[in-house]
Amino acid sequence: MSMLTRFGNGLYTGEKSFDFVGRRMLWYLIGAGVVLLAILITTLRGGFVFGIEFRGGSEFRVSEPVQVVESVAIDTVNEVVGVGSNPRVSIVGGDSVRVQTEQLTTEDTELIRVELAEAYNVPVSEVTSSFIGATWGQDITTQALRALVVFLVLVSAVMALYFRTWKMSLAAMTALIHDLVITAGVYGVLGFEITPAAVIGFLTILGYSLYDTVVVFDKVRENTAEDGEESTRTFADSVNLAVNQTLVRSINTSVVAVLPVGAILFIGSVLLGAGTLRDIALALFIGILAGTYSTIFIAAPMYVHLRENEPEARKQGRRKEVVQKTSSGAVR
């Protein structure tokens, strides 16, 4: 039997145990600190950087230029529009340059196409341009936020019905919001653009985070249902045992999920440059790691926090105290 298997069996039987629930205040402080930093730094940086799909503007793409240099595009746009236009230039796929600007007139758009073609020494036909109106982006943002609120309300209700307690639902939603804030915070702190692809990644995180939490909560419900009058475990002990019993499974699931996402992130970032692939993979990569952490260190301890003052949970705790006192007296 391998060392990892023995370790997993020890966690499942309770022979080995990590005190996730007992040190919950420490995990709360770490989680709150990271969330606070993400919000604070993002605010100090001036908020999120939204992609052209959300704020509107003009986009140019130069295919297969002789030199793939960002500064050439910046200088060209500044010469036409004026210094201070702050064009956003990125290399896509290693062989094309993408330039995003504020909304331009038809004349300026055509002039920049010609100037970019000359600057990069390519035919004008190799420089494409497109325009996205700000109204379209605002509509998409509004609908996305509305869909997110509806999703959270429906999922909260379904979880409360499934587990027959709103407290599990509240703990799961808290962990879910923690994951979303941290993932979005990384974008805000590092100044990455939030594009429709990144939003798809955020929404995918919702599913993974809930799945991981539901697996642990199912084990919690199974353990607490077994606690009868003769049980010497407290409610917190039963929850902590459930987290330990599912720990190896959670880690394995996360590793299996993170490895291919990490590979896609590497390909999207290093080999292909900024683009849809990188935006989706980055959100998934951060969200999976945050979701694994929040399930173990936030959701389960918070559920204990919400239940520990209930009469049945306190009665269960007193039974353990009686057993411990009896055992101590027998030794004497």
Image (tube, rainbow, N blue to C red):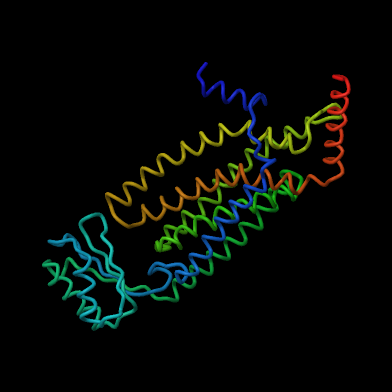
Residue name at image x 14 percent, y 71 percent: 119
Q: In the displayed structure, would residue 177 be above or below residue 13?
A: below
Q: In the displayed structure, would residue 110 be above or below residue 293?
A: below
Instruction: Specify the quadrant of the image occupied by residue 214.
Output: top right
Residue name at image x 20 percent, y 57 percent: 95
Q: In the current view of this chain or complex, which residue is farthest to the front? A: 332
Residue 133 image point, x, y percent: 39, 76
Q: In the current view of this chain or complex, which residue is farthest to the top? A: 1
Residue name at image x 52 percent, y 16 percent: 1
> Observer-nearest residue: 45 or 221?
45
> Observer-nearest residue: 26 or 14?
26
Q: In the displayed structure, would residue 209 be above or below residue 185?
A: above
Q: Is residue 64 left or right of residue 131?
A: left
Q: Is residue 164 left or right of residue 295?
A: right
> Observer-nearest residue: 41 or 146?
41
Please state the total of marks drawn on the protein image. 0
Instruction: Specify the quadrant of the image occupied by residue 292.
Output: top right
Residue 156 image point, x, y percent: 68, 53
Residue 154 image point, x, y percent: 66, 55
The quadrant of the rendering that contains the C terminus is top right
Q: Is residue 102 left or right of residue 228?
A: left
Residue name at image x 33 percent, y 73 percent: 131
Q: Is residue 90 left or right of residue 44?
A: left
Residue 279 image point, x, y percent: 39, 55
